């Protein structure tokens, strides 16, 4: 049998997913989950050199506490080379993680073997961001331990949750699981919702047994850490790999060279851009693979998240060397690593930097070559590629993959252009995440063509054929061609519209919530709907994984639910609509009491965190946690998300309370009108986003004034929690009574934290935007506090601000006047003027003035229900959880599988 062709790696058999059946050694005896005929096929040919290996093969998963403890100690002594006398929490974390990773790796090998043998269609999820958070607790939640050791009664096999077992073991060894978990730094390889979505999706793809890999970049620096100094955001680098990373497997044998710059050889016969062309590259770097095992809940399938790191090639510039410029030559090589040095910290905003384009191509090229190498092992013809491979583009960031596949097929594989293009478009699907202009990716052709000359040619050709088809279909519409063109003309320089390229290069385009999916059809992609028809455009409403966001973040609620559903093994987490059973209990006073207790405990947990962050000084009144409304807005700071509207309402409330007091009202009377509340904010601003940073400062300054006002006491507090990340979210979200999702209608594509809050029994105050619409439909309109203008009115309202004198509500005027008077910035009275100006002088683009009154009125309603009808509130909370099942990311993955990927689960 011939060896596999076209493998640019060595040692494929051991560290990569295995060979096709006829090349697999006799490993099957120790593998479970295979069909008998598969085992026979696998056994049929055994390379001689592998025989000895497999005969000695001993590696087993730990299956009980004893074995876990053995592994733990082995790792402390050998892998970490630490003395047992000197094993601190950090070492315990690393040893625990590596013991868990050992089990995952064994299952990973089996899973990849199985996928190779069965050769199902594979899904590749390309995302520049994976906001993973911590891995250990999640892995423990997902893992079941099948204990098959014999006890006194003879043989038995029991299945226990790894978290319970490991927790007990660590106790026996003198550690506390909670403290050990705390040692892990967040993998913050994302900005916000988009990156967290990718993390939830790979969790659900594993859980749903979909043969799927994620592809991303292994940034040395994730999203910056946020310090708040004198109320200002200060960014510090997040060197998250400082203590190593117990979860990654460095695959030095999986490397691909990636080329940049250079030119296309157009001499002699290379004249047509449609024919195979030779790109003579300039700079070359190596993409080296790092793998993260991705476990699913209660499945032995383990998927993979492959992240690329840039390294210098071992090639050497002899010209430089000979000229004696050794130092310089080494330095230049070193610069290769800068490609994957750092995550771009912008959320919903594109900057158009060359290094960013370099990151994108580096990642797309390495991922595609890896995908193709794997495909080639099956020896299938190219035309079957789209039957075996689906690639999902998480936003336009990976759109270069479309062009790169076309280049590989035409230039390297010598396929005919159109044959190649049919394969490309049948393979890719694109998820759009925004309709906001400033977030849509565009690249000037000059910069682009300099870095990727051949790709620019290919894009021009893709566009040329596309525009021909458009012209054929709409011969009379001349404007259409310039509107729909992938190349935007008319500005200073021609630009490549990446979203258009993604649409043209994909067979399906989806939005991330119903409203958003409708909006893309009527706004940015309306011409494409006209050309392709509406069926190319679809919706998959986002979701979140309930393993992390319910069981992991809110163990008490998980316990109450599993007891109530009589589901001790927590199978409900695989079938969230099962929660509807809770509907019957919404009015049950006993149940409400238990429910309320869970929320109270979570509020105390958050109050503890806030105290710790405040240097051990309480901000929240401990005596009154129970009747304090925890009102939370945590998300990236962005004008469209309108944290400024929230802080205006805090100022409004404060001023109104002060007026009452000045007019002689008693504190009891004030409290009657404005019941106890703490407004909690958190989130990072992009380092270069001036207005967002000023909003952070305003929140902190308002907090300083209100929190120190002795007249107000503990009736109102404003808190900014620094360094909002996934781990903080896991503490903050379960503690909310109310959360704020108040974006200008039509701007928030979906939102996912709205789902996290609802899944934890928090009520929402929100605009009719993103997934708030579906949340309302699922949980019922009585259980959500909606307000504000609708997206269909936004254009007109903006127009009015531009061309008419639109009055600002009196209450908002007072708030703005108070800010302008310098009451929150006595040392710099004009400090917050730019925020006031956006509303009063610059057309109030985000419509704060238009939504202010209905926002305040809705808050009054919130206050009344929370403080006067607490049982009613608790009932709404229960109903929220009972009906949130739709928002499990498992449901998303099922929808993608059926409607976009055409893929089926491979049973565990
Ligand atoms: C879920 C999540 C987000 C997204 O929040 P939105 O309110 O949907 O924008 C951002 N950051 C973190 C850390 C998250 O967990």
Image: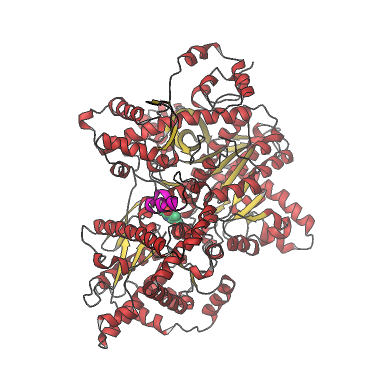
Give 666 or 219, whichever is nearer the viewer: 666
> In the rendering, at what x and y percent does residue 697 appear?
32, 66
> In the rendering, at what x and y percent does residue 564 appear?
44, 53
Q: Quadrant of the C terminus?
A: top right
Residue 560 in the magenta stretch? The answer is: yes
> In the rendering, at what x and y percent does residue 172 appear?
27, 35
Q: Quadrant of the N terminus?
A: top right
Residue 536 in the magenta stretch? The answer is: no
Give 652 or 417, whichever is nearer the viewer: 652
Query: For ligand 1, which image quadrant applies?
Result: bottom left
> In the rendering, at what x and y percent does residue 736 appear?
38, 62
> Is 163 left or right of 418, judged from the image as shown?
left
Q: Quadrant of residue 696?
A: bottom left
> Is 529 left or right of 564, judged from the image as shown?
right
Note whether residue 10 is visible: no
- How many marks the image carries: the answer is 0
Q: Residue at x 48, y 67 (%)?
A: 743
| Dominant secondary structure (helix, strand or loop) of the stretch shown in magenta | helix
> Is 496 left or right of 292, judged from the image as shown?
right
Q: Residue at x 63, y 38 (%)?
A: 389
Q: Residue at x 40, y 73 (%)?
A: 869
Taking the view exactly as shown, the residue that stands out farthest to the bottom is 663
Is residue 850 shown above or below 377? below
Give 50 or 376, whichever is nearer the viewer: 50
Span colored in magenta:
550-564
Q: Residue at x 48, y 12 (%)?
A: 52
> Is 612 left or right of 566, judged from the image as shown?
left
Note whether residue 485 is visible: yes
Q: How is the image coloured?
A: secondary structure
Q: Quadrant of residue 269?
A: top right
Taking the view exactly as shown, the residue that stands out farthest to the front is 153
């Amino acid at each position: 049998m011939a060896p596999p062709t076209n493998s640019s790696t060595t040692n494929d058999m051991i560290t990569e997913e295995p060979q096709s059946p006829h090349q697999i050694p006799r490993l099957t005896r120790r593998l479970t989950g295979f069909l008998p005929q598969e085992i026979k096929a696998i056994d049929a040919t055994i390379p001689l050199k592998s025989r000895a290996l497999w005969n000695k093969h001993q590696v087993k998963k730990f299956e009980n506490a004893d074995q876990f403890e053995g592994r733990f100690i082995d790792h402390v002594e050998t892998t970490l080379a630490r003395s047992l006398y000197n094993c601190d929490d950090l070492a315990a974390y690393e040893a625990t993680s590596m013991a868990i990773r050992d089990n995952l790796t064994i299952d990973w090998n089996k899973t990849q073997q199985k996928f190779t043998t069965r050769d199902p269609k594979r899904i590749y999820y390309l995302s520049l961001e994976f906001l993973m958070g911590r891995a250990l607790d999640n892995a423990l939640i997902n893992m079941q331990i099948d204990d098959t050791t014999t006890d006194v009664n003879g043989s038995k096999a029991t299945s226990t949750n790894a978290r319970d077992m490991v927790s007990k073991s660590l106790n026996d060894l003198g550690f506390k699981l909670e403290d050990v978990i705390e040692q892990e730094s967040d993998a913050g390889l994302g900005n916000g919702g988009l990156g967290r979505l990718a993390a939830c999706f790979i969790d659900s793809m594993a859980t749903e047994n979909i043969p799927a890999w994620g592809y991303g970049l292994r940034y040395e620096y994730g999203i910056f850490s946020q310090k708040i100094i004198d109320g200002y955001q200060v960014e510090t680098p997040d060197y998250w790999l400082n203590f190593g990373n117990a979860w990654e497997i460095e695959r030095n044998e999986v490397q691909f060279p990636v080329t940049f710059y250079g030119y296309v050889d157009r001499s002699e016969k290379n004249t047509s851009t449609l024919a195979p062309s030779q790109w003579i590259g300039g700079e070359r770097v190596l993409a080296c693979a790092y793998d993260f095992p991705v476990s699913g809940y209660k499945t032995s399938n383990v998927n993979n998240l492959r992240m690329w790191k840039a390294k210098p090639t071992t090639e050497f510039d002899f010209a430089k060397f000979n000229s004696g410029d050794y130092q310089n030559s080494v330095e230049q090589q070193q610069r290769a690593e800068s490609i994957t040095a750092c995550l771009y910290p912008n959320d919903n905003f594109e900057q158009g930097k060359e290094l960013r384009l370099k990151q994108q191509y580096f990642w797309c090229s390495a991922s595609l070559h890896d995908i193709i190498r794997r495909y080639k092992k099956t020896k299938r013809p190219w035309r079957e590629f789209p039957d075996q491979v689906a690639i999902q583009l998480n936003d336009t960031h990976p759109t270069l993959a479309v062009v790169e596949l076309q280049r590989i097929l035409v230039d390297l594989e010598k396929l005919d252009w159109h044959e190649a293009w049919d394969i490309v478009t049948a393979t890719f699907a694109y998820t759009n995440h925004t309709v906001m202009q400033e977030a849509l990716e565009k690249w000037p052709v000059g910069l682009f063509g300099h870095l990727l000359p051949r790709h620019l040619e290919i894009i021009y050709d893709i566009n040329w054929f596309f525009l021909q088809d458009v012209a054929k279909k709409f011969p009379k519409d001349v404007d259409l061609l310039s509107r729909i063109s992938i190349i935007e003309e008319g500005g200073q320089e021609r630009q490549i519209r990446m979203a258009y390229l993604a649409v043209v290069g994909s067979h399906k385009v989806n939005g991330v919530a119903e409203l958003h999916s409708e909006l893309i059809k009527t706004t940015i992609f309306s011409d494409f709907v006209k050309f392709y028809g509406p069926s190319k455009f679809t919706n998959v409403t986002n979701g979140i994984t309930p393993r992390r966001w319910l069981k992991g973040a809110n163990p008490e609620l998980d316990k109450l639910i599993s007891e109530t559903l009589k589901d001790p093994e927590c199978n409900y987490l695989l079938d969230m609509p099962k929660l509807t059973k809770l509907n019957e209990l919404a009015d049950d006073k006993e149940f409400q009491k238990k429910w309320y207790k869970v929320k109270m405990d979570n509020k105390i947990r958050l109050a503890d965190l806030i105290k710790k962050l405040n240097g051990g000084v309480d901000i929240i009144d401990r005596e009154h946690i129970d009747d304090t409304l925890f009102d939370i807005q945590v998300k990236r700071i962005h004008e469209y998300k309108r944290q400024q509207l929230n802080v205006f309402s805090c100022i409004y409330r404060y001023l109104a309370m002060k007026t009452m007091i000045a007019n002689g009202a008693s504190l009891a009377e004030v409290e009657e009108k404005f019941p106890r509340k703490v407004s909690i904010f958190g989130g990072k601003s992009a380092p270069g986003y001036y207005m967002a940073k000023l909003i952070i400062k305003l929140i902190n300054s308002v907090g300083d004034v209100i929190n120190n006002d002795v007249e107000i006491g503990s009736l109102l507090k404003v808190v900014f929690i620094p360094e909002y990340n996934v781990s903080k979210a896991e503490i903050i979200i379960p503690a909310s009574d109310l959360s704020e999702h108040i974006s200008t209608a039509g701007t928030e594509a979906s939102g996912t934290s709205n789902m996290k809050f609802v899944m934890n029994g928090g009520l929402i105050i929100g605009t009719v935007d993103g997934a708030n619409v579906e949340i309302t439909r699922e949980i019922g309109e009585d259980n959500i506090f909606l307000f504000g203008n609708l997206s269909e009115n936004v254009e007109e309202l903006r127009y009015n601000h531009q061309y008419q004198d639109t009055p600002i509500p009196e209450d908002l005027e007072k708030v703005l006047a108070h800010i302008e008077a310098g009451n929150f910035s006595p040392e710099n009275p004009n400090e917050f003027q730019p925020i006031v100006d956006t509303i009063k002088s610059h057309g109030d683009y985000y419509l704060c003035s238009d939504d202010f009154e209905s926002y305040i009125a809705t808050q009054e309603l919130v206050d009344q229900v929370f403080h006067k009808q607490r049982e009613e509130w608790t009932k709404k909370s229960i109903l929220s959880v009972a009906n949130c099942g739709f928002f499990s990311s498992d449901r998303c993955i099922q929808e993608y599988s059926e409607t976009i990927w055409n893929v089926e689960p491979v049973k565990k």
